[in-house]
Amino acid sequence: YAPDDQRLDTLCDCYYMLRNYAKVIEIHETYQNVPAFLYLVLAAAYAQYGNLEKAAEAVKSYEQLRPPGHDLKTHITYWMRMCSRQSDRDHWLEGFRKSGIDV
């Protein structure tokens, strides 16, 4: 992470939950060193925004950058545990599924 990237990561999550997918995409473009898992947020945002081609590209970027042995389903399971409301978990899962991620 560059100094501001952690803050931007949190903002992307917040804007995603506010259903402001265009802002997620805009913020993502300002990252200096994008960690692999943040491409999952981008994929979900693009999918919810209706751009499935860009969502697929983001998933592909995740696959290329993810650490060896990284288990996507376990990662998403932990991610879902951060959401206290079922509707929030469903919103994330919907975005992941629309982007082509099998969860």
Image (cartoon, rainbow, N blue to C red):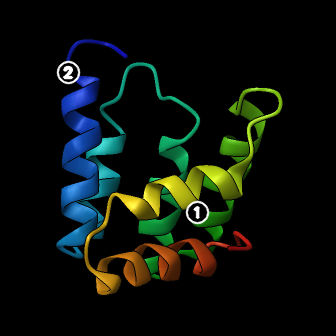
> What's the residue at 69%, 58% (across, down)?
73
> What's the residue at 56%, 58% (across, down)?
76
Decide: few, some or many residues near mark 2? Use Cα within 10 Å; few <14, some 14-19, many ≥20. few
Of pointers 1 and 2, the one earlier in the residue sequence: 2
How many numbered discs, if any? 2
Q: Is residue 65 left or right of residue 68?
A: left
Q: Residue 99 carries which label?
A: none
Q: What element carries label 1?
A: helix
| Quarter-of-image position of residue 96 | bottom right
> What's the residue at 75%, 43% (across, down)?
63
Give the amino acid at mark 2: Asp
| Quarter-of-image position of residue 49 | bottom left
Q: Position of residue 91 (x, y in %)?
A: 38, 81
Q: Is residue 82 above or below residue 34?
A: below
> What's the residue at 44%, 64% (across, down)?
80
Q: Residue 54 carries which label?
A: 1
Q: Is mark 2 on a helix, strand or loop?
A: loop
Q: Is residue 10 above or below residue 14?
A: above
- Disc 1 versus disc 2: distance between alpha carbons? 25 Å
Q: Position of residue 59 (x, y in %)?
A: 67, 55
Give the amino acid at mark 1: Lys
Q: Residue 4 carries which label?
A: 2
Relative depth, front residue between 82 and 50: 82
Query: Which residue is most to the top?
Result: 3
